[in-house]
Image (cartoon, helix red, strand yellow):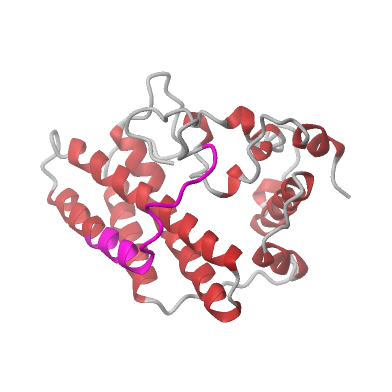
Amino acid sequence: MTDLRFMKLAVDPTMIPGVYNTCNQWCDYCPVTERCLAFRCRPRLDAGGDIYNDIAEAMHESMNFLKECHEAEGLTPPEDLMRLLNDDPRKSAKHVPLDDALEKMAKHYAFLAAAFLKTSGHDLESIPKRSDGPTPFDVFFYYHVLIAIKISRAIMSSAEAARNGSAEARRDANVSAKVALHGIDSSDEALQVLALDDADPRIEHMRRHLARLRREVEGRFPKARALVRAGLDDAASARYPAGISR
């Protein structure tokens, strides 16, 4: 049964239904957090306990949380979410790797970026929230794995749409691809700025890899760029700080 706190906020007309499914999850710089049910009802991480030390448990809690957000707003939870909840990840957390060239390309970028970050000399524990917006390094750091995650999701949703003709899965594929493209664009811009003060040849190598990745994602998901996400891309939405893509 849906928690009453979800229901109370879900009837607020200022909420944007499902916006949490279409963003980059960088809540620190998002202008619509007050209109996002997932953000407003997010679990308190300082409440004690060790649930977040157990990845499978955390996954299950997160999926239940998203399911409650959907139900509170009168939306149907995604099929893949319900399937994962029925196949409880705490009992058998399995990952089936994709045999897809684009997914491998995205993962390779994540490895390149991780290797660069390891020798960067920066504190990699967390990204602080900055009053004047994220630095180019923050942007590069934030997206270096998220790009691959979103591309993988786009590929899996696209495959589901091909299997059963699901319009919901097709939209999810395009939304995920759009977030990945925003991450690619923002990362490329960040690396361009970093290169002004750092002659490390790996920066240009990563930029070339991102350029190829951008072409491949746009080719695979040609409708992703033009897709309009409520609250994020429409004319009424507030703009993100410079350098941030949603």
- Residue 62 lies in the magenta-colored region: no
- The percent coordinates of residue 175 (x first, y second) are 48, 55
Left or right, 16 with reference to 85: left
* Vertical relation: 236 (above or below) 182: above
Whole-percent x, y for residue 163 in the image: 57, 80
For the residue pair 164 and 31, the one nearer the viewer reads as: 164
- Residue drawn at the location 59% of the way across and 31% of the way down: 33
- Please give the count of numbered marks on the rendered protein: 0
Residue at 32% across, 50% down: 184
- Is any part of residue 122 visible from this angle? no
- Name the foreground residue: 142 vs 34: 34
Is residue 224 on the magenta stretch?
A: yes
Position above or below: 219 against 177: below
Task: In the displayed orientation, state which residue is furthest to the right.
Answer: 1
Front residue (pair 245, 168):
168
The image quadrant of residue 6 is top right
Q: Residue at x 42, y 29 (%)?
A: 239
| Left or right of 208 on screen, residue 44 | right
Stretch in magenta? 212-231
Identity of the residue furthest to the front in this view: 235
In this view of the protein, can residue 211 be seen by the observer? yes
Residue 246, image x, y percentages: 44, 41
Report x, y in % for residue 24: 48, 45
